[in-house]
Amino acid sequence: MTQASEGQFRAGPLAHRVPDLGALELLLAVARLGSLGGAARELGITQPAASSRIRSMERQLGVALVDRSPRGSRLTDAGALVTDWARRIVEAAEAFDVGAQALRDRRDSRLRVAASMTIAEYLLPGWLLALRAQRPDTAVSLLAGNSAAVAERLLADEADLGFVEGLTVPTGLDSVVIAHDNLIVVTAPGHAWARRRRSLEASELATTPLILREKGSGTRQVLDAALGGLARPLIELSSTTAVKAAAVSGAGPA
């Protein structure tokens, strides 16, 4: 280990040796305005707070930075030198802030959406049109799958926002209910249930083979919960459109 590196090691972290940005901005304002009170007003702090910050910076650096008098505040020779260094640090921080904002803007301009099949088919097109009207610069990529797949994509950071149906949300995800819908039984016109006048009991529904969504679908989750897990699949299909088409064809109730 060299002598220089030993000295650097003993000095401790840089953050303990260099004044913070707020103090450097204050020093630059004093240099520009020639007044500690004016600098305090510009930065939105009280004059006592500004004085305390300057004194703290002087103790930290071990040199006097500002001469205060009834006529105003004047930088010492050391203060003028420190101000030149401070200006470069603040300019670098401003460049850092601009770059970070550019990253935020780029992130905000791209939205990765995952949605369950039903929502993707029937609701999202209208929502995306509304988003386009309000945020025309936002590019949206859509990933469609069942509710379980949507949750997996969110947990894997493959999507920023997900829309699902169902009763539960996996651990690690936040959720908000945005709408409710109802499940109803549908059949082709020629099915006996189409002419039925009395109510269809849950027990009868549970013992009848049905055209169902696949396991992992929010719709299937709700139906299984309503029937105590007793729903009997006649056919399992991966989209509401396919379920409707099968029902219309007379394959069975859905």
Image (cartoon, rainbow, N blue to C red):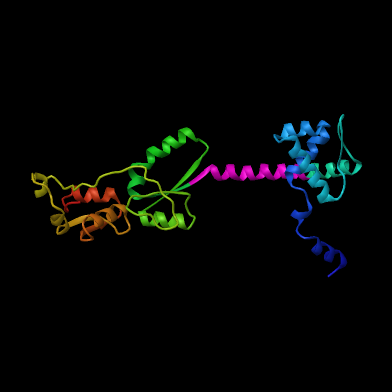
Q: Quadrant of residue 47?
A: top right
What is the x, y in percent for residue 108? Answer: 54, 43
What span is colored magenta in the figure? 89-111
Q: Residue furthest bottom?
A: 1
Residue 23 position in % (x across, y down): 76, 43
Residue 193 appears at what percent x and percent y?
11, 48
Q: Nearer the viewer, residue 53 or 241?
A: 53
Q: Is residue 191 visible?
A: no
Q: Examine the structure image and report whether residue 110 is included in the region drawn in magenta.
A: yes
Nearer to me, 59 or 242: 59
Residue 147 lies, with reference to residue 47, above or below; the image says below
Is residue 30 depicted above or below 225 in this figure?
above
Location of residue 46 (image quadrant)? top right
Q: In the picture shown, does residue 31 fall above or below 17?
A: above
Is residue 202 rendered to the left or right of residue 131?
left
Q: Residue furthest top?
A: 71
Q: As drawn, is 129 to the left or to the right of 52?
A: left
Q: Is residue 32 magenta?
A: no
Residue drawn at x 24%, y 51% is 243
Image quadrant assignment for residue 17: bottom right
Magenta part, dominant SS: helix
Residue at image position (76%, 40%) is 25
